[in-house]
Image (spheres, coloured by chain):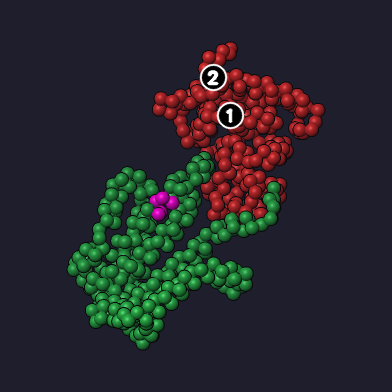
């Protein structure tokens, strides 16, 4: 059964229609990406999920209408949103503290995870002392330790340089294989979507609708050097073609 | 600073930074001394710095006696202003319409000329501490309020979004994100306001007081003792500098991550 299901979600800000018709589902333990051009309203979709905005349509979680938003989702924003005044350890406990856990209890719960996230020895550092990749890992740690039903990742690697981003994608794929989080990723990076996802929804430009749902049948672990790389390349080219052909260029005729 | 954190390199760096200021002040004093001694100008018009210093030493008991009420008025007035600014900044942050209702009033309060207001406040509230506190508060309240309100608004949008997604209410968001985000603005406002505060206190005393640096300056001027006026000016400048230095120390203690950011820049190579 699907964990998350959206049926015909629509959203307009004033007269501006942002989401035209979004239907999608995410199954338990599935990694799903939403891929679309910049400004397509992908982040608006997350705002509907986290309850920051309200739209028309139906949202279900585990078959029941979605009401208590905060309970189901752990949200990771585009930039790391680490608090400069909190040490890394205290940044990662933030979600637990908001849930009402004492600071000490929260620290004991987070501390053992630092090694796995490649942050061991940096607990007492401030975010400004860490590299971009480390900051993103800390942000992801802060997200997953909330132990919500599902992760919402909003272009988590968008602000990183290309090399760090590639390293972080590999690392995330490996982490995901161990934990099997149910995850929904927003990205406009085709390669990232193919590399990480089980399924991809391709969105049109604003007002966004789902133009294609694509299965990614590549075997895991997703090793960029493996034989499956060629298969991934074909898939990437196909998706890129879809995306480029839905740019709203005037006079462009495409069926 | 504690002796455990003493670092000779730090001291040398501090001296190197302070040297240009020390040299320029020294040059001004030397030029002033030479002019006062050799131009034939009367010491009752322009006393030499050496004479000012000499008289300050001779009158140090009187100066100290008059500095204490000024310090008291400055600190109490500033504390009142700070508490009021903090309370009101929170109200404004939670109820935005208040801002439109109140800010014009405060802006008008900043346009009042101190020269006109100070004697009136003394007239209404007498020669005691109250009018001094009020004047110090008048000149420092608005800059502190603006600094705090601006600081809250400088909170990173994504931190707010994330906290709300975590289920935090407005109060939690304020405590966890908006308040700490305002710290750099708060300290910038504090550094400016503390210097206004001393000036405000002296002005209030100038308009009427039993004791204080302001009234001391007025009396010295009326007695044709510019050397004593300047000695009192020196004391008030020293007082301002000490208070300013305190805010800098306070900021360092309250915001340790600022210096941590500098340490990363000094370290070699990235650690990915």
Residue B54 at least partly seen: yes
| Picture colour for chain B | green
Residue B146 in picture, x, y percent from top left: 37, 53
Q: CA distance from mark 1 to mark 2?
A: 34 Å
Which is more toward the observer, A152 or A17? A17
User: Would you name the residue on which mark 2 appears?
Assistant: A249
Left/right of residue A163 with respect to residue B23 in the rendered view:
right
Q: Is residue B97 placed above or below A15 in the rendered structure?
A: below
Spot the residue most to the right: A227
> Magenta region, mostly helix, strand or loop?
helix
Q: Is residue B191 placed above or below A97 in the rendered structure?
A: below
Q: Is residue B89 placed above or below B116 in the rendered structure?
A: above
Which stretch appears magenta?
B147-151
- Say which residue appears at 50% left-offset and 66% top-offset: B249
> Any mark on residue A4, and which?
1
- Say which residue appears at 46% left-offset and 33% top-offset: A53
Is B87 in the magenta?
no
Chain label for disc 1: A
Residue A22 at least partly seen: no
Label the red chain with its letter.
Answer: A
């Amino acid at each position: 059964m699907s964990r998350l299901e959206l049926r015909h979600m629509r959203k307009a800000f004033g007269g501006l229609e942002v989401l035209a018709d979004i239907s999608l589902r995410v199954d338990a333990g599935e990694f799903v990406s939403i891929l679309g051009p910049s400004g397509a309203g992908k982040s608006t979709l997350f705002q509907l999920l986290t309850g920051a905005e309200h739209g028309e349509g139906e949202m279900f979680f585990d078959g029941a209408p979605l009401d208590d938003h905060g309970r189901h989702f752990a949200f990771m924003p585009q930039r790391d949103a680490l608090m400069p005044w909190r040490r890394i350890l205290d940044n990662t406990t933030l979600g637990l503290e908001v849930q009402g856990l004492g600071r000490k209890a929260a620290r004991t719960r987070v501390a053992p995870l630092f090694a796995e996230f490649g942050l061991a020895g940096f607990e007492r550092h401030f975010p400004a002392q860490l590299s971009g990749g480390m900051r993103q890992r800390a942000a992801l740690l802060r997200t997953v330790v909330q132990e919500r039903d599902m992760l919402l990742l909003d272009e988590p690697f968008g602000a990183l340089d290309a090399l760090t981003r590639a390293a972080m994608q590999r690392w995330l794929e490996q982490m995901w294989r161990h934990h099997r989080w149910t995850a929904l990723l927003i990205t406009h990076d085709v390669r990232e979507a193919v590399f990480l996802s089980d399924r991809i929804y391709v969105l049109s430009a604003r007002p966004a609708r789902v133009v294609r749902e694509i299965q990614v049948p590549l075997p895991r672990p997703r090793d960029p050097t493996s034989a499956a790389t060629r298969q991934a390349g074909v898939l990437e080219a196909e998706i890129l073609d879809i995306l480029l052909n839905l740019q709203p260029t005037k006079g462009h005729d495409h069926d | 600073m504690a002796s455990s954190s003493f670092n000779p390199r730090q001291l040398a760096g501090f001296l190197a930074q302070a040297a240009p200021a020390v040299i320029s002040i020294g040059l001004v004093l030397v030029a002033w001394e030479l002019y006062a001694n050799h131009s034939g100008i009367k010491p009752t018009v322009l006393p030499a710095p050496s004479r000012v210093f000499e008289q300050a030493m001779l009158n140090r008991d009187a100066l100290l006696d008059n500095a204490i009420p000024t310090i008291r008025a400055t600190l109490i007035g500033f504390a009142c202003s700070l508490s009021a600014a903090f309370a009101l900044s929170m109200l404004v942050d939670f109820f935005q319409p208040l801002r439109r209702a109140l800010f014009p009033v405060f802006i008008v309060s900043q346009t009042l000329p101190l020269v006109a207001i100070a004697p009136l406040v003394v007239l209404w509230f007498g020669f005691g501490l109250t009018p001094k506190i009020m004047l110090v508060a008048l000149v420092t309240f608005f800059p502190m309020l603006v600094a705090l309100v601006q600081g809250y608004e400088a909170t990173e949008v994504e931190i707010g979004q994330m906290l709300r997604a975590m289920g935090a209410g407005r109060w939690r968001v304020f405590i966890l994100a908006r308040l700490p985000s305002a710290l750099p603005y708060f300290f910038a406002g504090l550094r400016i306001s503390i210097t206004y505060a001393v000036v405000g206190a002296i002005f209030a005393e100038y308009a009427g007081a039993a004791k204080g640096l302001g009234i001391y300056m007025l009396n010295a001027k009326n007695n044709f003792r510019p050397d004593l006026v300047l000695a009192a000016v020196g004391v008030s400048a020293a007082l301002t500098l000490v208070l300013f230095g305190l805010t800098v120390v306070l900021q360092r203690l309250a915001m340790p991550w600022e210096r941590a950011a500098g340490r990363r820049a000094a370290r070699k190579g990235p650690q990915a």
